[in-house]
Image (cartoon, rainbow, N blue to C red):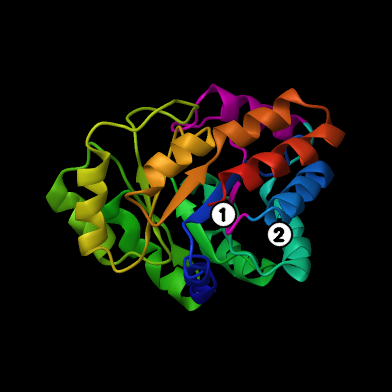
């Protein structure tokens, strides 16, 4: 499963990672959209588990989470959806979640179910470095990569510690604050990414705020891949379900280079 993530960065181009709020607007529509994104060229999909009390999500993803929760999305249903997608596609799937959700039925049981559903890795938004050792043995047991987050405010010494044991890829947050569509390239991005890539044993992808092909190209110059979330989620929320597949597929195709 960790190898499957590595394969997403060995295709001769900058990897395109797309975040979706799983179950938004409904589980069935979400499954169709994810399938179309994969077919449009997404190299890896982050499945965001909707949460009622997020800390890192901006207004676009918060709204999508509320819609998904209202329509019955939950972790068991999301994992069933992942299993159906895995039967059709080999594209890596990373579960993007908060620790409380993963602990509800016991962390090990949840990771076991993740592995059985075809999940390749997990990104736990609120897991600090100091507590990572508590979960890594379980993740290793089920061959799940723990995706590490590094922020622009992270001191260099701490960033080096975070990426030292990184698996899959490192998610570099390009801007301060919560998720959301922005424009341009953040100050210091090239320097920060250069340092990270030198000390990271795995690829480094840049995310937060990337909304256009121009943004993607500018950020990807200094990274191994780019992550697009809010811009895709916004299209799903704004359009009718039947339109969302076409709109998001078109954006994914435009972001490939």
Image coords of residue 104 (percent x, y)? 58, 50
Residue 47 in picture, x, y percent from top left: 61, 50
Q: Are marks 2 and 1 in contact (CB under 8 Å)?
A: yes
Res. 30 mark: none
User: Which residue is painted at 35% across and 66% down in the image?
Assistant: 202
- In the picture, measured across the screen, residue 162 lies left or right of residue 99, that is left
Local secondary structure at mark 1: strand
Disc 1 crowd rating (10 Å Cα; few below 14, some 14-19, many 20+) is: many
The residue carrying mark 2 is 82
Left/right of residue 7 with respect to residue 234 in the rendered view: left
Residue that mark 1 sits on: 95
Residue 136 in which image quadrant: bottom left
Q: What separation in Å lies between label 2 and label 1 (alpha carbons)?
A: 9 Å
Residue at point 35% right, 52% down?
A: 223
Q: Residue at x 53, y 49 (%)?
A: 96
In the foreground, 59 or 74:
59
Q: Residue furthest right?
A: 242
| Pick the front one: 141 or 224 | 224
Q: Residue 138 at x, y = what percent?
A: 45, 70
Is 43 covered by the magenta stretch? Answer: yes
Is residue 213 in the magenta section?
no
Q: Residue furthest left?
A: 157
Q: Which residues are magenta?
A: 42-70
Work out which quarter of the rendered image holds the N terminus and state it: bottom right
Left-right relation of 122 to 74 = left
Q: First in sequence: mark 2 or mark 1?
A: 2
């Amino acid at each position: 499963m960790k190898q499957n993530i590595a394969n997403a960065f060995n295709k001769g181009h900058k990897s395109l990672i797309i975040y979706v709020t799983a179950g938004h607007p409904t589980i069935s529509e979400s499954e169709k959209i994810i399938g179309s994104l994969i077919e449009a060229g997404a190299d890896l999909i982050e499945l965001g588990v909707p949460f009622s009390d997020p800390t890192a999500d901006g207004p676009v993803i918060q709204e999508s989470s509320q819609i998904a929760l209202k329509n019955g999305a939950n972790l068991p249903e999301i994992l069933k959806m992942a299993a159906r997608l895995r039967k059709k596609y080999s594209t890596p799937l990373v579960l993007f979640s908060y620790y409380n959700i993963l602990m509800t039925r016991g962390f090990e049981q949840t990771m076991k179910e993740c592995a059985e559903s075809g999940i390749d890795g997990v990104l736990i938004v609120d897991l600090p470095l100091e507590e990572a050792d508590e979960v890594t043995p379980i993740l290793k047991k089920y061959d799940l990569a723990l995706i590490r987050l590094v922020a622009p405010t992270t001191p260099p010494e701490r960033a080096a510690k975070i990426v030292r044991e990184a698996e899959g890829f490192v998610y570099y947050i390009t801007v301060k604050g919560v998720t959301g569509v922005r424009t341009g390239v953040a100050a210091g991005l090239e320097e920060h990414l250069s340092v990270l890539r030198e000390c990271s044993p795995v690829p480094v992808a840049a995310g937060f705020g990337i909304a256009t092909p121009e943004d993607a190209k500018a950020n990807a110059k200094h990274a191994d891949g780019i992550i697009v979330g809010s811009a895709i989620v916004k299209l799903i929320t704004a359009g009718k379900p039947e339109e969302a597949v076409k709109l998001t597929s078109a954006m994914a195709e435009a972001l490939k280079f």
